[in-house]
């Protein structure tokens, strides 16, 4: 669904202001330019990095994302004529649609916005007709979830603009339905939950079956550590088809094993489950999900105990599982992980759905430049396009800016 190319999007602004001042000003200016006048308010929702727990969300399992300082801002105000108008700094020509919009009507980037209006109404809420202008410094199509940031910013804006009583815990599923049923991308609940429910300085431990959350302390600086995010800048290929195929394999495995979802298989039951599956592809996919859920639980235990450095091997094991069992990595992310580890990282893994995207590395706080340089050197040696690296801190979830 990447109708707007990654090149068209702002590249990640290293050290982006946590106040999102520049992006907020851009959104307000885009609003004035498209519609005249000032917006009634500005609402922001962040991109995210998933610390660990990949492809576990649609298996009713566990995930552990944190919100990025990079975010999408929606400048919004009431519409004078009862229709919706939307524009983005990446697509300045306004798109319009009515309150009764239905899947298939708005396509391209506007589907993420119209989808939120549709999903709100489908859930029994009446969003106010609005004019919206979008600006963002979340890199598009890099696995940092610019799509959920867009949906979550729009959802939060419409809920607050209309004074709708939509409990926080229900919001991610509404935004997810916009992406699943209006946009047509079969994604899990991870991205929208992270964008809406994360808190600054915390990682979000989410049970994707019950939607129960726990805010896990994630104070890297106090431990002398940092997370380096390395955008591989690798071209995404076959993402939608491969994602769907992984989902189908997981569902097939759960059906054969007679459980509602692979979440219901624990590590102790894994050997017997693998025997029953027979098919080698299903065995590998199942082994990833079952062991990945356990790695999330183990990571949470260590973070709760303040043993941050010790999560490194779990991150690296997660990468090996995604590479060998789930088969969703590409050469650029494998090289990113290997070269970060060779440069002294405590652990590293691809983050996001796969087939390109970003790597995260747990490093000593004073090793960011050296690690980024080592990865860039390894990419240059192999003739890969240069990666983009920056240190990520855990920012706040969706909310009103002003
Ligand atoms: P990711 O979520 O990993 O960044 P996706 O392919 O899921 O990648 O979502 C990217 C799509 O989301 C873009 O192609 C575009 O349609 C939409 N999008 C995200 N941010 C913006 C924005 N600021 N303006 C317009 N469209 C956006
Ligand atoms: Mg997305």
Image (spheres, rainbow, N blue to C red):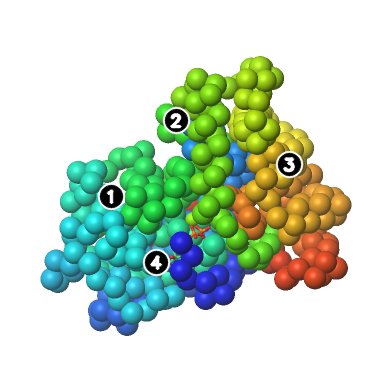
How far apart marks 3 and 1 lie (CA) works out to: 37 Å
Q: Is residue 310 visible?
A: yes
- Label 2 sits on residue: 209
- Of the numbered discs in the image, which one, if any, rests on residue 223? none
In this rendering, the label closer to the viewer, 4 or 3: 3
Between disc 1 and disc 2, whose residue precedes?
1
Between disc 3 and disc 1, whose residue precedes?
1
State yes or no: Cβ of the residue under disc 4 lies below 8 Å from any atom of ligand 1. yes
- Marks 1 and 4: in contact by CB < 8 Å? no
Q: Residue at x 46, y 43 (%)?
A: 188
- Label 1 sits on residue: 119
327 or 217, nearer to the observer = 327
| Percent x, y of residue 257 | 54, 21
- Label 4 sits on residue: 109
- Label 3 sits on residue: 324
Q: Residues within 10 Å of mark 3 (few under 14, many from 20)?
A: few
Disc 3, SS: helix
How far apart marks 2 and 3 lie (CA) works out to: 26 Å
Q: Residue at x 45, y 42 (%)?
A: 189
């Amino acid at each position: 669904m990447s109708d707007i190319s990654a090149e068209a999007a702002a590249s990640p602004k290293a050290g982006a202001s946590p106040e999102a001042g520049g992006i907020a000003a851009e959104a307000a200016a885009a609003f004035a330019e498209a519609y005249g006048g000032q917006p009634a308010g500005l609402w922001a929702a962040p991109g995210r990095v998933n610390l660990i727990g990949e492809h576990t969300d649609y298996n009713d399992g566990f995930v552990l994302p944190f919100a990025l300082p990079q975010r999408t801002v929606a400048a919004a105000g009431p519409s004078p004529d009862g229709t919706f108008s939307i524009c983005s700094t990446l697509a300045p020509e306004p798109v319009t649609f009515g309150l009764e919009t239905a899947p298939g009507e708005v396509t391209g980037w506007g589907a993420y916005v119209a989808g939120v209006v549709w999903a709100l109404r489908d859930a029994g809420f009446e969003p106010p007709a609005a004019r919206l202008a979008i600006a963002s410094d979340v890199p598009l199509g890099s696995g940092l979830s610019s799509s959920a940031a867009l949906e979550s910013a729009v959802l939060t804006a419409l809920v607050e603009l209309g004074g709708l009583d939509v409990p926080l815990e229900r919001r991610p599923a509404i935004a997810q339905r916009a992406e699943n049923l209006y946009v047509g991308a079969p994604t899990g609940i991870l991205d929208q939950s992270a964008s809406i429910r994360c808190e600054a300085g915390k990682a979000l431990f989410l049970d994707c079956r019950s939607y129960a959350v726990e805010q896990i302390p994630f104070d890297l600086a106090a431990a002398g550590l940092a997370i380096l995010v390395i955008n591989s800048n690798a071209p995404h290929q076959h993402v939608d088809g491969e994602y769907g195929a992984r989902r189908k394999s997981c569902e097939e495995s759960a059906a054969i094993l007679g459980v509602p979802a692979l979440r219901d298989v624990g590590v102790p039951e894994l050997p017997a489950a693998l025997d029953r599956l027979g098919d080698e592809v299903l065995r590998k996919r199942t082994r990833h999900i079952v062991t990945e859920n356990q790695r999330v639980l183990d990571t949470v235990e260590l973070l709760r105990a303040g043993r941050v450095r010790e999560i490194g091997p779990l991150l690296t094991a997660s990468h090996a599982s995604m590479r060998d069992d789930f088969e969703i990595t590409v050469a650029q992310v494998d090289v990113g992980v290997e070269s970060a580890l060779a440069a002294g990282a405590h652990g590293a893994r691809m983050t996001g759905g796969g087939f390109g995207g970003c790597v995260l590395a747990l490093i000593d706080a004073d090793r960011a430049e050296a690690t980024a340089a080592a990865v860039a050197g390894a990419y240059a040696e192999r003739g890969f396009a240069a990666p983009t690296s920056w240190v990520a801190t855990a920012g706040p979830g969706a909310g009103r800016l002003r």
